[in-house]
Image: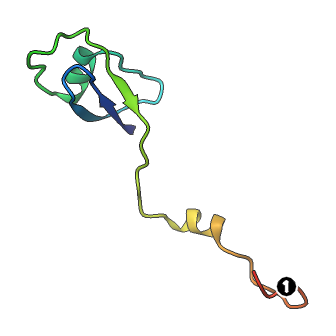
Amino acid sequence: MITYDYYCDDNGETLSVSHSSKETLTNWGQLCSVANHHMGNTPPFTPVRRLISCQESEPDESTLSMFSKPKSSGGGCSCC
């Protein structure tokens, strides 16, 4: 499951929810249901939009090895 942030222009609220990447939430009622959040005075069919966000996480060993620089074996440029 991936965590997504959704924003409602009507009430100015942003909610974070986790769901499958195949699922898309399009309105306040769906979002509140998944987030277990009280709808308040916002009508259930009010549109919401998914925000683009970057989640930081601690890299694991496999991720680190993908980005590590190869060890110089000599004879090449020493700038890298």
- At mark 1, the secondary structure is loop
- Quadrant (top left/top right/bottom left/bottom right) for the N terminus: top left
Q: Position of residue 29 (x, y in %)?
A: 22, 15
Position of 65 relative to 20 (above/below): below
| Left or right: 14 in relation to 4 | left
* Residue situated furthest bottom in the rendering: 74
Q: Residue at x 57, y 62 (%)?
A: 63
Position of 63 relative to 51 (above/below): below
Q: Position of residue 43 (x, y in %)?
A: 17, 10
Q: Residue at x 79, y 85 (%)?
A: 72
Q: Position of residue 49 (x, y in %)?
A: 37, 24
Taking depth in this image into account, of 33 and 8 the one nearest to the observer is: 8
Residue under circle 1? 77
Q: Position of residue 18 (x, y in %)?
A: 33, 35
Q: Residue at x 36, y 20 (%)?
A: 25
Question: In the figure, residue 66 lies in which quadrant?
Answer: bottom right
Position of 33 relative to 18 (above/below): above
- Amino acid type at circle 1 is Cys
Q: Residue at x 75, y 80 (%)?
A: 80
